[in-house]
Amino acid sequence: MAKKFIQKLIHKFIPDHDVIKKHKNLQFLGDKLLEPNLWHLNRHSVAKAFAVGLFCAWIPAPGQMAIAAAGAFYFRANLLISVALVWLTNPVTMPPLFYFAYRVGLTILNLPDASFSLDAILSGEILFPFLTGCLVLGIVCSTVGYFGINYFWRYHATKKWATRKQTRKNKSSKKNPFRSIY
């Protein structure tokens, strides 16, 4: 029941192909906008979407959603999921996540902690470790997201097939009680 609700909710937000094709601001994309993986939910498009969205979430620049959309087009990932995952870094979560990125950058570069002052920011003492941490965390999160979704999807599909096989086996044994003898 929850699965049907989620599917209906997702399909409610996916626009119709004709509406997308006729939208005046999107006509420059042509038929690329109708690529099935941009809109369908399958293992490959969702895994790629997690990789693109999680990487773009760590980009410390305005326009993360546009970058994620461009990445989704390029890698043929699910567009909605790619753009939605960028919102992991929102105005509430950005300060602690980007401070964590700064600390990761300091650790990777083996640099001492710089004081947060205008001079330290302008001289790049904080900027280089921060950008390094964002890059490393973007790569790590996108890799973990891609392989994690692939693993989860395969595990779920395998479990579903095993359940279906067991159900069919139980139904066939109930129909013919002498089947196991022959």
Image (cartoon, rainbow, N blue to C red):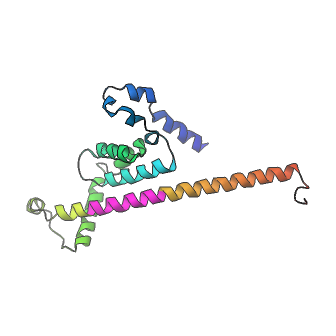
Looking at the rendered image, the quarter that the C terminus falls into is bottom right
State the residue in front, 33 or 91. 33
In the displayed structure, 61 sits above or below 32; it is below
Q: Magenta region: which residues?
A: 133-148
State the residue in front, 161 or 98. 161
174 with respect to 3 (left or right): right
159 with respect to 131 (left or right): right
Residue 103: give x, y in percent of width and height: 25, 67
Looking at the rendered image, the quarter that the N terminus falls into is top right
Residue 170: give x, y in percent of width and height: 79, 53
In the displayed structure, 165 sits above or below 101; it is above
Residue drawn at x 36%, y 54% is: 54
Residue 154: give x, y in percent of width and height: 56, 56
- The part of the image, by quadrant, that contains residue 126 is bottom left
Residue drawn at x 49%, y 33% is: 12
Q: Please identify the residue farthest to the front as the structure is shown.
A: 31
Residue 80: give x, y in percent of width and height: 41, 41
- The part of the image, by quadrant, that contains residue 162 is bottom right
Answer whether residue 170 is magenta in the image.
no
Residue drawn at x 43%, y 41% is: 38
- Say how many tags the image has: 0
Secondary structure mostly taken by the magenta-highlighted segment of the chain: helix
